[in-house]
Amino acid sequence: MRFLGIDYGTKRIGVAVSDENIILAFPKGILPNDLNIFKNLEEILKIENVSEIVVGESVDFKGQENVVSKEIEIFISELKNKFNLPVHKQKEFLTSVEARGEGGKEKNNDRKIKREGSKKIDDSAAALILQRYLDRRNLQK
């Protein structure tokens, strides 16, 4: 039994899986957010023997819903309907920044490099989301 972590994006979806003991999260890959997304997720769910899903909940600096929040809610609803698995939400605040190791610092001349490299961090952000959820879950036991 494993958990699947998801960092939802309008263009790409980062995924991560837990270990079998549901203690550690590992980046799994980055999927295009296209018409095949649920087919691709179904394959991962089966291969990894996933029993629960954790989706990053997007909020702004004030903790309020942002532009992507409604899309995430629709996505979560579709996940529940298609896979009949428990779906949990975990705040994803600054996980992409943390995954890049930027600490919020960026030089003007580095913007193009950061933007091009950002495609490689979605699964790391998913792993951070999942790890935060697992840590909180395991502390409550």
Image (cartoon, rainbow, N blue to C red):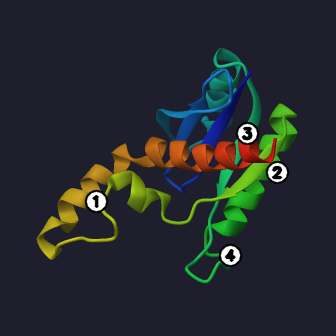
Q: Nearer the viewer, mark 2 or mark 4?
A: 4
Cα gap from disc 4 to disc 3, whole angstroms = 21 Å
Residue drawn at x 16%, y 75% as measured from the top left: 108
User: Label 3 neighbourhood size at 10 Å, few (<14), some (14-19), many (20+)?
Assistant: many
- Which sits earlier in the primary sequence, circle 3 or circle 2? 3
Asked which quadrant contains residue 80, the reply is: top right
Tag 3–tag 1 contact (CB < 8 Å): no
- What is the x, y in percent for residue 97? 40, 61
Task: State left or right for residue 86 relative to residue 32.
Answer: right
Q: Which residue is mark 4?
A: 65
Kindly identify the amino acid type of the residue bearing the numbered disc 4: Glu
In the rendered image, the residue lying farthest to the left is: 109
- Which circle's residue, 1 or 4, is located before the other in the chain? 4
Residue 13 appears in view? no
Answer few, some or many: residues within 10 Å of disc 1's Cα (few below 14, many 20 plus, some between 14 and 19): few
Examine the rendered structure and indicate whether residue 80 appears above or below residue 47: below
Which structural element holds mark 3? strand
Mark 4 is surrounded, within 10 Å at the Cα level, by few (under 14), some (14 to 19) or many (20 or more) other residues, namely: few
**Residue type at tag 2:** Ser
Give the mark, 3 or 1, whose residue is nearer the N terminus: 3
C-alpha separation, residue under disc 3 versus residue under disc 2 = 12 Å
Q: Tell me the residue that label 1 is attached to.
A: 115
**Name of the residue lying farthest toward the bottom:** 62
Which numbered disc, 2 or 1, marks the residue that appears first in the sequence?
A: 2
Report helix, strand or loop for mark 2.
Answer: helix
- Residue beneath label 2, please? 77
Q: CA distance from mark 1 to mark 4?
A: 24 Å
- Per the image, the residue denoted by label 3 is 53
| Mark-to-mark CA distance, 2 and 1 | 30 Å
